[in-house]
Image (tube, helix red, strand yellow):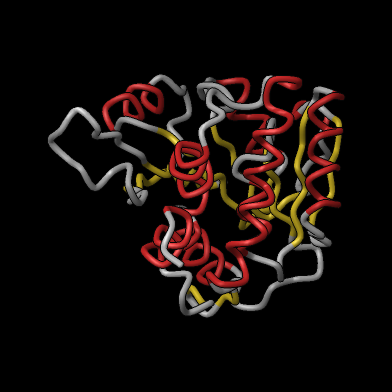
Amino acid sequence: MSSVLHDGLLALGFGDGNFSGIQTRKAEELEPILESYVSALQEYNSKFDLINTDEHDEIVIRHILDSLAAVPELCSQISKRFPEIPDDFVIADIGSGAGLPGIPLSAALPTFKFVCVERMTKRCGFLNHCKELLNLQNVSVEENQVERLMQKRFAVAVFRAFRPLEKKMTKVLLRILQDNGFLAAYKARHDKIAEEMAALPQNPSYSVVPLLVPFLTENTGTEEERERNLVIIEKA
């Protein structure tokens, strides 16, 4: 059955269940999990102030597919840096909020452990509800501030709509990474990314990868155009 979510998952490549040799859930298995997540967002949005819309297709495009658009690049980076996945390999979603991108990513990548780090108690309650509702056994929820996280704990840290990068926060984020780990920041306009990175005193090594989000970024040149990028930041 055609739907925005179904068609979007196929457009992102989830028909094959594999990116760069890393197993993912196939679209037909992933779709019902994510539909349940969308329903939970709609049900609890007004209570917990989770996202900026209650409309189904808008949630799917701007939040679910947007989160999943990074999976091919994340898998490429992981397979390149970790030819063999160690036992302590964990991906952190920093400032998880409504679970974005951590919940969609953990649903798509069931072989990896995820920690959704969120400082607000009520949102942690929502994240734990989603974990149980969606039967995501590879997810844990941690009520904490990023500044208090243990050093060298995570292989990868992702964040979306967290906060602009600045000197202190970048240092904190890099500190929680293992030596061969990386940060993956969901960002918008390329020119704004350049400004943000240039303002950092130590100029960390980074690359910007354009994200193609189905139904969001393909209408280039129109008022519907929305630029999306993934910034990969290296740990020196």
Snapshot quadrant of residue 61:
top left
- Which part of the image, by quadrant, shows the C terminus? top right
Number of marks present in the image shown: 0
Tell me residue 187's x, y (percent). 42, 34
Tell me residue 91's x, y (percent). 69, 53
Q: Is residue 236 visible?
A: no
Q: Is residue 65 left or right of residue 119?
A: left
Residue at 53 percent across and 26 percent down: it is 53
Q: Is residue 55 left or right of residue 211?
A: right
Q: Is residue 46 visible?
A: yes
In this rendered view, identify the residue nearer to me: 144 or 13. 13
Residue at 47 percent across and 55 percent down: it is 5
Q: Is residue 72 left or right of residue 222?
A: right
Q: Is residue 120 above or below residue 151?
A: above
In this rendered view, identify the residue nearer to me: 154 or 63. 63
Tell me residue 27's x, y (percent). 53, 69
In this rendered view, identify the residue nearer to me: 193 or 162. 162
Q: Is residue 157 above or below residue 224?
A: below
Snapshot quadrant of residue 175:
top right
In this rendered view, identify the residue nearer to me: 180 or 55. 55
Q: Is residue 97 above or below residue 158?
A: above
Q: Is residue 14 left or right of residue 108?
A: left
Residue at 40 percent across and 23 percent down: it is 196
Q: Residue furthest front?
A: 1
Tell me residue 180's x, y (percent). 61, 57
